[in-house]
Image: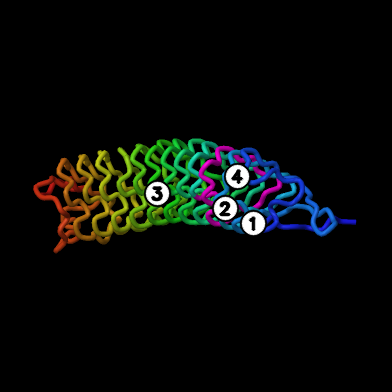
């Protein structure tokens, strides 16, 4: 006969088999005694251990889901051993766990909810399995000590603000099948000097790399539009290469890139927004894949934000 299931909640968490939630070390058993019967623990419920004083938590392999706010604000929590059968980590489940330094997500997890590790300011090591296909917004936002991320191969969309404010993030490996990078995904990633954007990417959202530490950017032709303020304030950015196929650059896309010296624009560009190069005071050269006549038509009544920069077109130079 199958054992009945039970969800661990803030009301029943002190049942037999638990170490008290104010102790340093908590091992949750696979079954707990409830109403005279042993029931299998499959879910850690909403706010089950929110704001508790736990240091270490070990989940049994019976657990499939960690729900909203389950360990929210556990400021002393420094280690979590997750279930090997886990499938979902809910919204802000570990938000504000300031002492958590390492998290290894087991293979089989499909979804990380919105802000699930938001503001884990000591988090340095994150291991993500290829089984993950969905992440909510702000999932690692303001995890200021994360140094590197390898994103799952099955991930097609990087959500809004995924690594916003991750100022120590220096290395990100994007999956080959990635399609979208949503707004503010890497906003303020000051240590991120390089990122290889795969040709599968068709969309990069507003401010996706604003104030990041990028030095050299290559944008594939699969991206039809460089959106507003995508690279705004990237003060270390020195060179930009936009491949043929891109058709538009929106306003202030590269504004405030004060170290930018060279930008390559393809002949496929049909529309330029205003001030796309505003305050790019180090700019020495614009290389354009179209003709001089096409360039003059393209920038007609458009204020680029720079003056007296030579434009090398396919048939000669123009200023």
Q: Nearer the viewer, mark 4 or mark 3?
A: 3
Q: CB atoms at circles 1 and 3 under 8 Å apart?
A: no
Write down the region rendered in magenta.
71-95
**Colour pattern:** rainbow
Which residue position holds label 4? 130
The percent coordinates of residue 128 (x first, y second) are 57, 42
Question: The N terminus appears in which quarter of the rendering?
Answer: bottom right
Q: CA distance from mark 3 to mark 2?
A: 24 Å
Mark nearest the camera among 3 and 2 is 2
At mark 3, the secondary structure is loop
Question: Which of disc 4 and disc 1 is earlier in sequence?
Answer: 1
Mark 1 vs mark 4: give the one in front.
Answer: 1
- Is disc 4 placed on a helix, strand or loop? loop
Q: Position of residue 163 (x, y in %)?
A: 43, 47
Contact (CB < 8 A) between labels 2 and 1? yes
* Residue 164: image tag: 3
Query: Residue 143 or 202: which is nearer the viewer?
Result: 143
Say which mark, if any, is on residue 10. Answer: 1
Residue 164 screen position, x and y as percent? 40, 49
Q: How far separated are the C-alphas under marks 2 and 1?
A: 8 Å
Distance from label 2 to label 4 (Cα)? 29 Å
How would you rate the neighbour count of disc 3 (Cα within 10 Å): few for under 14, some for 14-19, many for 20 or more? Answer: many
Q: Residues within 10 Å of mark 4 (few under 14, many from 20)?
A: some
Crowd band around label 2 with a 10 angstrom C-alpha radius: few (<14), some (14–19), many (20+):
many
Label 1 vs label 4: CA separation? Answer: 32 Å
Is residue 73 covered in magenta?
A: yes
């Amino acid at each position: 006969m199958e054992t009945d299931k039970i969800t661990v909640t803030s009301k029943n968490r002190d049942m037999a088999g638990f170490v008290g939630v104010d102790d340093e070390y908590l091992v949750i058993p696979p079954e707990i005694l409830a109403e005279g019967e042993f029931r299998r623990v499959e879910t850690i419920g909403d706010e089950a251990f929110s704001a508790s004083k736990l240091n270490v938590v070990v989940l049994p392999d019976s657990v499939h889901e960690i729900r909203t706010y389950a360990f929210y604000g556990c400021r002393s929590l420094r280690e979590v051993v997750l279930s090997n059968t886990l499938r979902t980590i809910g919204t802000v489940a570990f938000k504000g766990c300031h002492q958590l330094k390492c998290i290894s997500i087991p293979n089989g997890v499909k979804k990380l909810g919105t802000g699930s590790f938001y503001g884990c300011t000591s988090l340095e090591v994150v291991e993500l399995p290829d089984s993950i296909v969905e992440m909510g917004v702000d999932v690692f936002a303001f995890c200021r000590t994360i140094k590197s991320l390898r994103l799952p191969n099955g991930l097609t969309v990087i959500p809004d603000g995924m690594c916003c404010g991750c100022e120590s993030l220096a290395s990100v490996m994007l999956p080959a099948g990635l399609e979208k990078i949503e707004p503010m995904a890497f906003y303020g990633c000051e240590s991120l000097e390089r990122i290889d954007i795969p040709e599968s990417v068709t969309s990069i959202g507003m401010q996706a790399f604003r104030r990041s530490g990028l030095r050299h950017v290559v944008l594939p032709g699969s991206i039809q539009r460089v959106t507003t303020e995508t690279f705004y304030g990237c003060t270390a950015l020195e060179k930009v290469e936009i491949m043929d196929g891109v058709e538009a650059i929106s306003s202030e896309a590269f504004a405030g890139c004060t170290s930018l010296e060279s930008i390559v624009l393809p002949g496929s560009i049909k529309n330029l927004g205003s001030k796309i190069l505003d305050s790019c005071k180090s700019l020495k050269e614009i290389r354009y894949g179209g003709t001089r006549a096409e360039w003059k038509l393209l920038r007609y009544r458009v204020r680029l934000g720079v003056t007296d920069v030579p434009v090398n077109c396919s048939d000669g130079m123009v200023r």
